Image: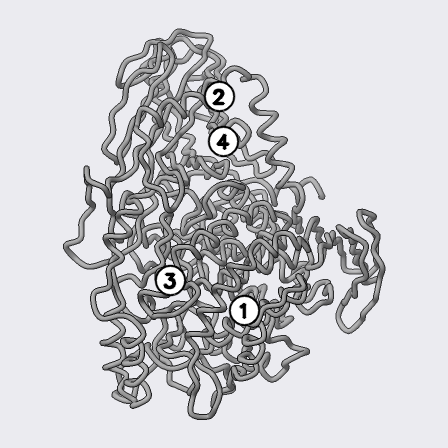
Amino acid sequence: MRDRMTAAATELTYDAPAADWLEALPLGNGRIGAMAFGGPGRDRIALNDETLWSGSPATTRRLATPVGEVGAAAVDRIRAALSEGDVRKAEELAHGFHSGHSQAYLPLGDLLLAIQVTGRLDGEVTKYRRRLDLDSAVARSEYEIAGVEVWQEVFVSAPAQALVLRLVSSQPLDVTISLTSQLRATTHTVDDNGLALLATCPSSVPPPHGRAGLEIEYSDGEDRGMNAAVVFRARTDGSVTATDEALIVSNSTDLLLVLSTATGYEGPHTAPTRTASECRDAADTAVLDALARSEELRDEHVADYQSLFRRSILTLPSTAELTTDRRLADASDDPGLAALIYNFGRYLMISSSRPGGLPTNLQGIWNEHLQPPWSSNYTVNINTEMNYWPAETTSLSECHEPLLTYVKDLAVAGRRTAEILYGAKGWAAHHNADAWCWTAPVDGNPKWANWPMAGVWMCRHLWDHFAFTGDRDYLREVWPVLRGAAEFCLDWLIELPDGTLGTAPSTSPENEYIAADGSPASVTISSTMDLSLISDLFDRCVQTANELGLADSLVDDLATARKRIPDPQIGGRGQLQEWLDDLPEAEPQHRHTSHLIGLHPGDQITPDGTPELARAAARTLELRGDKSTGWSLAWRISLWARLRDGAAAHRLVRELLTPAGDSGTDYVGDGSGLYPNLFCAHPPFQIDGNFGATAGIAEMLLQSHTGELEIFPALPAEWSEGAITGLRARGGVGVDLEWSPSAATAVLTADRDTTVVIRYGDQRQEVSLSAGVPLSCQVRS
């Protein structure tokens, strides 16, 4: 039973090759991303590099020019219009702060294989099987073609910084291998056993949902796009013929192919000047190094990957013996599928976010479109933050590093934005960002563009990393970033007629209310999200000063201001108000639940500490309903878990674990859920729902935001037995759980000597932990 539970939770299986990109299997080493189709006869592996973006710092400077008046006086005019009740004038003035658009994350190319049995033109394919093993991060396809047994394995190695493909057959095969790209690109031979693709990126790629008339641009000027390259070499027991278009392998029963990539990206504030030839040489160096130790590649890849993945694995009962796509389509409850999506989320994080790299974007590191949905950028009004919710709680703290480093870079760019746009101190960022640290409001609608709180929210990640690790040196390092965001907020706050502090102009990301004229509006005074984020940041800054023993007059100012920021209000329907006033919602089932940020990922609202606000948050979720986009469902899992409602959280898990509608590349689709390869649908594909689901399931099993270690705060009845390793609690405590209908055990292991309070239901137990020494506790017997 246990072996079946583990397999059901750690394998994606299929009995047909991928028919399209959303059926292909994702692989990655943090930098290089690949989508393996597993096609017999003709195969495709789609390639990405996390640093391959359109544009440059020069492009950002050109496009980030406001279209109207900006500065402190312009802000005051908006505030005056709002105080006079003229919302339409306020929105018109808000448009003046808009500028161009952030840049796009790009596809690098495709590796194509044409495979046939030597001496035969075709043959029937039988016994086909394809799988992704989450425990080893290896994709494998196997089949018979014309009676010849064939198997292929693909993985992307972090130690080798290379993609490795091995193709083995029981009789000789002929394989033609080529590279292609949607970018401006050429290919040529590399010695007598390899092929290189040299590419140039556009200088600007507008979002496809933007204004008509904006097209993809290529430039030879200062803002030219970066160069990039792909190189592969082959080793075989057959023969190899190289041309500038393809590598032709003949009479091979064992083919090893090693591929790597390189781009001109050298950081967010540096022009990408590396030539395509220099990129080729860098990629080829990695390929040659890997080929020199080809016998070690698979083992070192698996060992490196498992050192992260095996820290936390969830298993739940499953009787399903179906392929993954059929399990998804099956209407019956399959707890093992919930375990699979938890483990898959951690797999995706390890595969797409490694120290030293860029953060995961809207699609992780996997994108096939030259003009991708929402630019496949960093949407920092929820989606980028959600990508990293499982990092600390599921023992992947190292994978958090790319975002933590990126926030520091964003703060550098955001200082200029705060000063020029608002005449404010500190730093600010808005709802879109990219590899060049775009921080300005994009052109479009104020309901998403005029929201300067992204930096404030992302600072919460800096604090959370400290809360889970206790690393004071790190906290001292990021203090200037926290302080700068707080400086901006202190300048941004205004005194309201009742003597409290608020924000104006203010929006609640992407949502609208019904204004006095009966039409939707977004700009107002003091959205609940604004005040919740600012309150949280001020609290964290005071805590940081106490932790580090800092003497800083700004901290005193923050503590004083914090007392004047009002708590969230409860509206006439018993709901938590989204805005300062109890305004009617233009879209009552809106996907964003921004005003509940104090419940999760914040900790200002708890069932014990603020019961009235907790009940209002629950009422808000009831009014919003369960139907929403994939990432929104994932957030609601965590929200219900924080309310200790396991039945509601499980209902949302089940809602997410359904087949997604076929939305193609449209921006509205037939419904949320998961695609056949378990990628989450917005729709279309966005990876934040995958990460949010993993985080939500972790919250159902363990919470520590109140200072206690609460075991099974939202365990649903349907998960009557199971086991999970490697959950993490704040304060540096690892937690393993195992449970059945009759008993439950928690094993706690602390990073340092400490005392913690374990809570299960209404029972509390204080225990002392010695560093590195596991302590087993019966929480139910």
Task: Identify residue for label 2.
Answer: 166
Q: Is residue 277 left or right of residue 693?
A: left
Q: Is residue 643 visible?
A: yes
Q: CA distance from mark 3 to mark 2?
A: 43 Å
Task: Reply above or below: 294 against 64.
Answer: above
Task: Identify residue for label 3.
Answer: 431
Upstream in sequence: badge 4 or badge 2? 4
Q: Is residue 475 left or right of residue 247?
A: right
Task: Reply above or below: 558 against 160.
Answer: below
Residue at x 28% of width, y 85% of height: 81
Q: CA distance from mark 4 to mark 2?
A: 12 Å
In the image, what residue type sits under mark 3?
His
Upstream in sequence: badge 1 or badge 4? 4
User: How many numbered discs?
Assistant: 4
Upstream in sequence: badge 3 or badge 4? 4
Callout 4 secondary element: strand
Task: Identify residue for label 4.
Answer: 156
For disc 3, the neighbor class at 10 Å (few under 14, some 14 to 19, many from 20) is many
For disc 1, the neighbor class at 10 Å (few under 14, some 14 to 19, many from 20) is many
Q: Determine contact: label 3, label 4, CB under 8 Å.
A: no
Residue extending furthest toward the left? 213
Q: CA distance from mark 3 to mark 4?
A: 32 Å
Task: Reply above or below: 652 against 401.
Answer: below
Q: Is residue 585 left or right of residue 129?
A: left
Is 126 in front, or is 654? 654
